Every structure is written in C-alpha cells, then in structure tokens.
Image (cartoon, coloured by chain):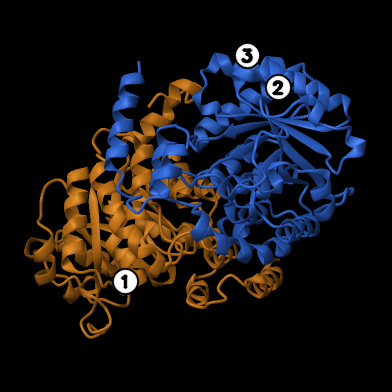
Chain colours: A orange, B blue
Amino acid sequence: MGLDTRVNCCPDGLVTDRRRRIKVLDCTIRDGGLCNQWQFDHGVVKRVYEALLDSGIDYMEVGYKTRPGLADPKTDGPWRFCAESDLAQVVERNEKLQIATMVDVGRIDASDIPPCSDSSIDVIRIATYSHQMEEALRLLDHCLEQGYETFMNVMAVSTLAPDDVDEFLVKLAGSGIHNVAIVDSFGALYPYHVRYLVHKYMNYLGENIKVGVHFHNNQQQAFANSIAAIDEGVDFVDATLHGIGRGAGNCPLELLLFYLDNPKYDARPILDLVEEFASMRDDLRWGYHLPYAISGFFNIHPRSAMDRMARVDRYQVREMYETLSKRAENTDE
Amino acid sequence: MGLDTRVNCCPDGLVTDRRRRIKVLDCTIRDGGLCNQWQFDHGVVKRVYEALLDSGIDYMEVGYKTRPGLADPKTDGPWRFCAESDLAQVVERNEKLQIATMVDVGRIDASDIPPCSDSSIDVIRIATYSHQMEEALRLLDHCLEQGYETFMNVMAVSTLAPDDVDEFLVKLAGSGIHNVAIVDSFGALYPYHVRYLVHKYMNYLGENIKVGVHFHNNQQQAFANSIAAIDEGVDFVDATLHGIGRGAGNCPLELLLFYLDNPKYDARPILDLVEEFASMRDDLRWGYHLPYAISGFFNIHPRSAMDRMARVDRYQVREMYETLSKRAENTDE
C-alpha cells in the first residue's frame, strides 16, 4: 500500500503476523435478518453466497435454525428457519466456504438438528446467555455427536461480573467446543475492554479452542474493536456487508478485508454487492444514529433505541440520556 | 457507569488518567463548512457556541480567516472569512470557551491578522503542508507577536516519508508554537499508525508543546484513532457535532464526550443540537460511504470520492478500487 512505508510504523511486525492468522465469518443474512425479519429473497442470499465464495471468506452464517412453530413463517422469512429445501437453493457444500447457522438456546431442540452428513450446514453456532449455559452445553454435545464444527456466542458479556465470565469460560474450556466468540451485543465495549476480554478468553480457553469476536457498532467501535482484538491475537472476526445488523449494525466486511490486507481475500466481489445492501440502509436504519450510541454507552439492550428509531422524533434524546444517567448513578456502587 | 466494574478491566488506571488530561476542540463550523461552503446562518453558529460553552468544551474553531478577494462571498458563507462583525454576532470572548479560527498557508497574509486584543479570536490555527513550512513559521511568528495562542496542523501526514516528518517536527520544536495536531486529512490511518505518530510527535516536540489529533472517518476510525491517541497520552482532540466534516467527516463530539467520562463536560447541550445537524446529513452526505472508505484506504485526497458521492452511481466502485489498486502496486517498492 505504501502507507506503512510512509509513516514507518509497525516496527515489530506483530500487526502483520496477527492479521495473517484471521479467519472471517460473514453474518450478513443472520444478523442483518434481525433488521428485516429475515425477508431476504433467495436471489439475494445466493448472490451473497457467491460473493463470499469468490472473495475467499471462510464462513457464511446464513440464518437461524428455529424450532418449528416458534416463529410465524408469514412474518419471518426463510432464514429464520434455514430449512434444507431453502438452503439447497442458495448454497452448496464446498471446501472453501463453510456454511453456518445459529441456534438460540431455548428456541431449538436437539431433535431439530439433523446429522451434519444430511445437511447443507457445516457449522452450528450456539447463541446463549451465560445463565443458560447448562442447556447450551447439552446442545453442544448433540451438535458434536452429529458431526458439526461448533461455535458458541455467549451474549452480552458487557453485562456480566468478572466471576461470571470466569465461570462460563471454565465450563467451556473442557466442553469440546471449537470456537468461542466475545460478543458485544449492546455495542458497549471500548478497545481497552476488548483487550482485557481477549486475554481472559484466550487464557481460560487454552490452545485448542479458537477465540473470535462479534461486535456491534453503536459507538463506531465495531471495526475498531475488531482491530484491537486482532492485535491481541484472536483467531476469527465476524463482519457483515456494509455493516448491516441489528441496531447500529456490525463490523463492515469491506473495511475488515482492507485492514487484513491478505492476498487470500479479494475485496472486489464484496464491493460489487455493497451497492445492493447500501440501498437497504435508509429503510432498515442500521449505522450511526444517536439513540444507538446512547444505548451502547449505557450498556443496555438496543431494543428501546430501535423503537425510538421508528419514531419521527428519534433524535430528541435528552430524556433518554437523563433517565439512563440517573439509572447508572443508582446502580454504581 | 458500571461497565468498567462489570468487565473489570483497566487494571492500571492509565486509561482513566489519560482521559482526564484531554482538552476538546470543536471544529463543527470550520470543517463542517467544507461540506456546505460555510453557509451556516448566524443563528446556527450562535446555538453551537452556546452549546459548546454550556457543555464545557475548551475550544471552538468557528471558521477560516481568508485573504480578502480570494474567495467569493456570494458562494462562500461568512465563516470562510470570520470578519469581526460576523464574529461579534455569535461569540463573546470569555474565560471558558476559547474561540479559534484556522488560516491556510497561501490563503492569508500576516497583515490580515489583527492584534489579538482587537479581535474576538483567542487562537489562530495555521494549516499547512510540510513543504510550506517556512511560510507557516513566518505566519506563526506574526500570530505570536499579535498575542494569539497558536496551533499548527501539518496536513496529510500519511503521505510523508518518516524523514520528512522528523524534519518539520524539528523545526516546530524550536518555533514557539503552543499546539501541534497530527492530521489524518485522508482518513488513512489505523490505530497502529496513530500510536507510532503520537510517540514521534511527543518525543520531538518535547514537554512545552501540546500534541493533539484531527482525524477523518473514512474507515470508521476517527473516534477509534482518537481513543488510541488518548491512550498514548496526547493533550487535545478535535471533534464535531455528529461528526460533520469534509468527506466522511470527523470524530463525533458526542461519542468523544461519552468516552472521556469527565464531569467537567456535560454532553446534554451537545445532544440537544445533534438533531439539527443530523437533519443536514442526508443532504451533505458525510458519514460512512464506500467511496470515502476506498479513498481513505488508498491514502488519497477525498476529492474524487466527494465527486463520486454527487453521482447516482456513487456506490459502483469496482473501477475506482481496481485503478487505485494498480496505482498502489506500481508505487510500492
């Protein structure tokens, strides 16, 4: 690029080494589906699949698997369910791009997850809150028996006391899980939090479990926190096309590929698709907006900010800020 | 806030100490004016002044001073010129909020800068490219004689070879300048570049010259790079309301105040004003857009990206990306 030569930085080469080891997980359809009830038509999802394949991305998370009857197929699109018949229309199992789905603890039964050899899915990612860890571990055992590479996202780590984090990490260390992500569901973390958590996760989980990150962009930190995590040595990073995702969205895949600067990835097929996703942004309203910034800063679920974003007075936030300030003062020791 | 207690990070207290020492320079009208030819009416500028005063911000950069006749007052609004008669309608000299204007080397004569005691201006900030440093130093001498606190922005540091940076820093170290900013005009820097440059600037400039940062948000790094600079110990940070500024814009002031978490600042008057600025965003098109991300990544002036953003096919960027990729390959050793 010339830039590194220009400013003559990166003297120890660590940044380069750590960028090289990263694998990339695209969760455009899964997390982006939280904005539009997974109403992506099959053509869009197939274009995403092909672009990810052509660009050399490692994983595509194509949606959720959900217990039949739990969600209404009239309101929620096919990627809430990931039926094999839908998957077969858009993805092919292949050696380059691994296909993943997410399952939410409490919204899936083990019996809903077929053997890996009967499915288009290579990877199951279990999303859980820490207090549901026993059920998450039972699901994990089932997924491993069925032959899946298995990931776990323990959500909203920014709300947990340090001992609670230690406790679930100890359980995961002996569980057989392949990958664990640090998940900033509320977009609350700054890089100094990320550095601390990366060290903790890596120390507790040991050498045989990969550590990754899934960040939200409420405070324009999703990509920056990903960089901080990469610098500290994580193994994989989640990203989405143009940053689509719940609330403020996620780390933009295109920016991540620029930063990784790794010839195994080709950014061009991703850039070609961004125009299509950018056209959804005004309607779905992810990106930098004040209500999301405030909910992130106060470390609360983006739900109330998303409700506010649907209103005309969405930016009249003084009351929101003052209410959350008072609540924060009252809960601090 | 509870969040730091929750994730139990920041064990050495350095982050807190370094946040405490930061002064904030708002350049909403000056850099934002690059989006709209400084066509802010006096009412808007007065509301910005009052909000900054009420929130405890340290500096307000209210526009440029420009040599009479150089720009056309029919196309460029009053904050391109900062006539005393306009300033008198919107700001008052006071002890809390220092009023600054920027002057561009080559677009101002020393004789256009009156004695500080005759002006509403407390601070002159000289913007220069490194190759214009001799003229910048002559302007500096004049500003110091006239009694101003004087800053210098050496622009586009990402395009300079390390020796060139050393050379201008040596000149500035003995110049009498009060403040020097690291300026990422093209939005090209990542945090590892910032850390390197902060160390270099601080080492060369010594203890009596303050070091600050002015970042652009092409790659969603303006706030993140500001955090990296704060962590390394800089003295001041530039920001703007809702991130308004040329191209992708700047570090959003509201996010910076959240991060600083310093009781001397009150974010509420800023939040009250963001709605007014957010309403300009669709029209003026700062924020995260693919052409800016690409020009930032390839370390070029945002001009071509801004031209592209005015077109309907603004997101059809493959050719832009491929052209810049080839050029970068050819210029790398």
Distance between the alpha carbons at the discs numbered 3 and 1: 58 Å
Give a yes or no on whether discs 3 and 1 share a subunit: no
Q: Where residue A105 appears, x then y in whole percent? A: 32, 73
Give the label on residue A104, or none: 1
Residue at which label 2 appears: B136
Q: Determine crowd level at label 2: few under 14, some 14-19, many 20+ residues with C-alpha closer than 10 A.
A: many
Amino acid, disc 3? Glu
Who is closer to the viewer here, B322 or A295?
Answer: B322
Kind of element beneath mark 3: helix
Please tell me which residue is depicted at 37% across the width and 44% down the height of the picture. A256
Amino acid, disc 1? Asp
Kind of element beneath mark 1: strand
Residue at which label 3 appears: B167
Amino acid, disc 2? Ala
Q: Which chain carries label 2?
A: B
| A78 sits to left or right of A208 | left
| In the depicted structure, whether residue B152 falls above or below residue A276 | above
Quadrant containing the N terminus of chain B in the rendered view: bottom right
Which residue is outermost to the left? A118
Distance between the alpha carbons at the discs numbered 1 and 2: 61 Å
Which residue is outermost to the right? B117
Total of numbered circles in the picture? Answer: 3
Q: Determine crowd level at label 1: few under 14, some 14-19, many 20+ residues with C-alpha closer than 10 A.
A: some
Please tell me which residue is depicted at 59% across the width and 56% down the height of the picture. B242
Q: Which chain carries label 1?
A: A
Work out whether mark 2 precedes mark 3 in sequence or the reverse, and give the earlier one: 2
